[in-house]
Image (cartoon, helix red, strand yellow):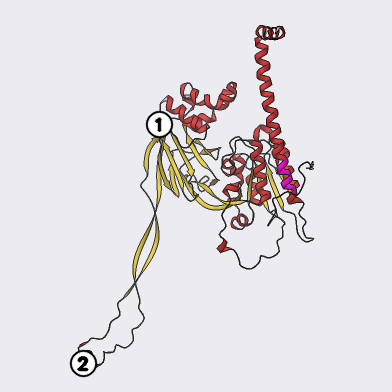
Amino acid sequence: MEKIRKVGSTLRNHWKKSVFLTVAGGYGGNWYWKKLQDNDFMRKCCREALTYGATPIGVHQQNYHVTVVLNPAASGGKARKLFEQYSAPLLHLAGFKVSIQKTEGREEAKELLKIMENCDAVLIAGGDGTLMEAVTGVMKREDKENFTSRTPLGIIPLGTKNSLANTLFPSTDQVRQLAESTMAVIRQIKRPVSVIEVENLSTDEFMRGKKLFGTNSLEMGAWREADARKDNYWFFAGLKHRMTYVFSYLTGHKEVTWDWPISVATLKIEKLTRHLDAQPSPPPTPQRRGGFAGFFSSPSKIAPKTEETEEIVESWQEPVSMEAGQVQVNMGTNGDELNIKIFPNNSTFGEFVSEGWCRINKDSTYSSVPPEVLTSTQFKLDTFSSPENPRLMTVDGEEVELTGPIRISVLPNVLTMFCGTADAAVVDPSTQPTQPPPAQTSRWSTPSVTSQYLSGTNFKSRI
């Protein structure tokens, strides 16, 4: 009992050190437990990947060739380390032939995808900006239909937001998301993905007709600009994402555009049914009925036939002008339409902060500032900007200068991307050939996912 009293007295007299050691010990224990979980998950993925790599192939068959477009600057300069630690070992264990192309500047990923050849798949190892550049490069290829049909794209999420990756591989754990995105390539799980096309309609001949392509969203307005200021509040550490909305409303109002004069025109698509008179074939020679009844009857006549045809008519509606606080364009649920959300510009402090925090939590079911929502396949959006007075917007989280009116369109299911098991495309058995398929040129056509190796075996890979 005396020893217990001495320990209690010591802790009370040195309470600052006690609190510090308790917090440090708790943090260290949590970090160690997380490390054990990550190692266990990676061990399971390595065993499965090695099962694919151990499958024998024919003499004339070639290894699956993957080209990785790596942005080393992503994740604050830690992208290369994360890729080599969690993704590269799985690709090598699966027996893939891996080529790595590192980007060193803006739009380099776009130029690489314009000329990419001789690979079975392309993996984008970076953030939303690298992915946007890569998709733009693919869509600007002269042979884009042929390339997209035979070369799927994959994402190795190494950015800060990873918007599309969070949809394809929903997880809040970075290690698990990196491993799952890599295993999707090994398992060959794919799905079609739609693309957002943004075309510049400026009167400037140099800018008019230029296009960007994204896969997730387009944003402009107060909440976007407040989020872009979060690094100014670095001293709040983990709270900087929340405090940026508080201080952007209270003290940073001069750096945030609260009133966006916009004009929105919606493309209306209608199906019209028309009745056309078909030209009947020449009738046979009319004959009267025999007997006494035929004396009073008239020759039979053939009634004209009508055919129904459906025509799709597209027409632009009258533009609607208003003052907005935020404009946000998102892909629809099925990927065949766009939703444009127009938020009002008169939100209070509580509404502005609450809406910003909902965006941090990715809570799309609640909005403290209900927006006006329009749905269509195309929009014409004018923010009354010009090359002399540009504005900023983000496409998939990447800042883009807005210099004039734009047309926003959806291109349904133009890309094939690797995804998680839950989002895999459903194959209709009725569309499959009845004859057995020809010999595959790759061993990943019908792989086994059950490891035949002992759980205690240690595996090592070389990069």
Nearest the viewer among 67 and 382 is 67
Question: Where, by quadrant of the figure, is residue 262 drawn?
Answer: top left
Q: Main secondary structure of the magenta part?
A: helix
User: Can residue 142 be seen in this snapshot?
Assistant: no
Nearest the viewer among 125 and 403 is 125
Q: Is residue 118 above or below residue 403?
A: below
Q: Is residue 207 magenta?
A: no
Instruction: Select label 2 or label 1 by which is in front.
Output: 2
Residue 208 x/y as whole percent: 50, 47
Please report contact status of discs 2 and 1: CB closer than 8 Å, yes or no.
no
Q: Is residue 343 left or right of residue 6?
A: left
In the rendered view of the protein, which quadrant contains the N terminus?
top right
Residue furthest toward the front? Answer: 1
Which kind of residue does numbered mark 1 sit on?
Answer: Asn
The residue at which mark 1 appears reads as 345
Q: Is residue 326 above or below residue 191?
A: above
What span is colored magenta in the figure?
A: 43-50
The residue at which mark 2 appears reads as 292
Which kind of residue does numbered mark 2 sit on?
Answer: Phe
Sequence-wise first label, 2 or 1: 2
Residue 152 x/y as whole percent: 63, 52
Q: Is residue 47 magenta?
A: yes
